[in-house]
Image (cartoon, rainbow, N blue to C red):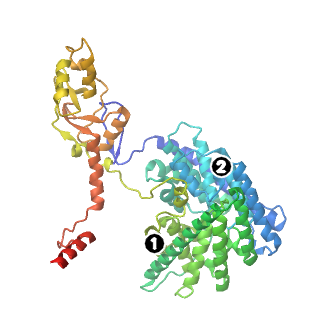
Amino acid sequence: MAIEKATTPGERRALADFRADRRLLMLVAKAVVIAVAGTVAAWMLLALIALVTNLFWFGKLDAGAVSLSKATPSLWMVCVPILGGLVIGLMARFGSEKIRGHGIPEAIEAILIGGSRMSPKVAVLKPISSAISIGTGGPFGAEGPIIMTGGAIGSLFAQFFHLSAAERKTLLVAGAVAGMTAIFGTPVAAVLLAVELLLFEWRPRSFIPVTAAAVTATILRPALFGTGPLFPFTADPTLPWWGLLVCVGLGALTGLVSCALTTLLYACEDLFERLPIHWMWWPALGGLMVGLGGMIEPRALGVGYDVIADLLGGHIVMSAVLLILCVKTAIWLVALSSGTSGGVLAPLLILGGAMGWLVGSALPGEPGYWALLGMAAMLGGTMRAPLTGALFAVELTGDMHALPALLAASAAAYAVTVLLLKRSILTEKIARRGQHITREYGIDPHQFTRVSDVMTWHVETLPGHIPVREAVAVLETGRHQAYPVVDEEGRPIGFVTRADALLWATQIGHADERVDERVSDAALPFVHPNDVTAQAIDFMLSSDLGRLPVVDPQSSILVGLVTRKDLLKAQAAFSRSETERQAYFGGWKMRPRSQKVTDAKAASSS
């Protein structure tokens, strides 16, 4: 339940389902402009990656996409990733350290901690460093860098206008979503990714502009990237009655692998932290591992979209899948933990797809179908975004029939990872920087709790017409720290505290003054019994008061008080609803383990 803030104490506070206003239309217009820029930035990033790839590996100036599977294993294959790592280390050291990593944690950190403000350096250096990293063989995807780049574009554009941090966040995420939509052609999954990872809310103020950005990128995409799904694929999803249970099992297995990958990644990062050299040199060491892996299996280098297509289409043999899985895992873990620049989405798709393909080779149906389930499960579990994982796989392939199985596998992987790991591969990096975030959304209890549910009724008051000396006497002998002052009709006009009484007692010549002459406040904020407690909190914060008068909405006569302590009752009730358990049918109740131990000891002693 949203509330419309009152600008004056007497203004009526209207309750509504949502808090959206006409500024929403302004945000939509800005999001469309940002989406255009984000789409162009995505196209430029892919062209730059292709240019670097062709230049370093094939010695030609060409921006056409090419697979590194055509690269010939040689000493040069080891040297190129090292050179790329050296350049990235120098850019991070002397340019901006924020270009290190895979982009999404940095975007989350900017949203939650930095007021959704990014620097121009990030907008320029992040795509360049990512193009160098991926183009020189780094086993990463372009989605993390474009999310960071698109977010930086949205943030920079927003900083030219008088906007709140929440509005800047909306435009930052709009740029990120536009970039992801442009690269993958997955507008629904991009919006879901924003909801599950970046926005930390579900409100019209953010959802509608972000959706507008995704739609804009979808409209522009055919002119820059072509039409149709990125990996056209249709498998026969007809399974026996126990088929969905197998999908759940595959998802759970993928969740276990996801936990192992996350643990190994940060174990590798810890090893890098122990090295007696500056972090600027770490990407070069990661590049050495990439080059050695490329000598074993060149297809493990780069983005690997061709590998994803082969896994789905079945144009691959088991030995190749095993080799790609092992090499890709090793070089991805070491390279990413070294602090180089690149995304995690495409590698997760390859790793999950390879594992699903291997398991699926022993299951009914095509291995490509199980590879698709593995991709969705790995994405949903590792990034803790199960809806994104399922819808992303559908939009990538255009196969709507597989959606139930995709959802089952993705949710199972998600369940395993949230039960076994405290944080995801994204939030663990943020936690290691000393910050904590929560990924659980819920309704604020103060948005639906009425003031009448927590307020104090029938309070003691001070009449405004009494002299100051009588008020001082009441406060010196009374039970309360403060008393509301009311006029002849019982309407509140202010408060008198013990601090006021102490001050008045030391002043000479004011004892016969009326109290209402000392405390009358025409702008005294108040609330009504039917207002929600969130309204009371807003007024307390804006007026720096610890208590508010509660008045009758018709006569404005004082009917009670609401204090800060009263407002905690709403939170206490919400906490009880989460922790107190009770059976309403059957009467059987599970006793706590401590009580069972106590009963057992009592029985043995008797």
Q: Label 1 sits on what residue type?
A: Val
The outermost residue toward the right is 59
Report helix, strand or loop for mark 1.
helix
Residue 443 vs 405, above or below: the answer is above
For the point 29% across and 47% down, the residue is 568
Q: Amino acid at mark 2?
A: Val
Give the class, few, some or many, for how many residues have Cα within 10 Å of label 1's Cα (few <14, many ≥20).
Answer: many
Between discs 1 and 2, the one toward the N terminus: 2
Measured as percent of width and height from the top left, residue 74 is found at 82, 74
Note whether residue 103 is visible.
Answer: yes
Q: Percent from the top left, x then y, of residue 269? A: 61, 64
User: Which residue is identified by label 2?
Assistant: 122
Q: Is residue 459 above or below residue 38?
A: above
- Give the structural element (helix, strand or loop) at label 2: helix
Indicate the position of residue 505 as horizontal and vertical percent values: 24, 19
433 horizontally vs 145: left or right: left
* Label at residue 416: 1
Residue 131 image-quadrant placement? bottom right
Density class for disc 2 (Cα within 10 Å; few <14, some 14-19, many ≥20) is many
Q: In the displayed structure, does residue 597 sit left or right of residue 391?
A: left
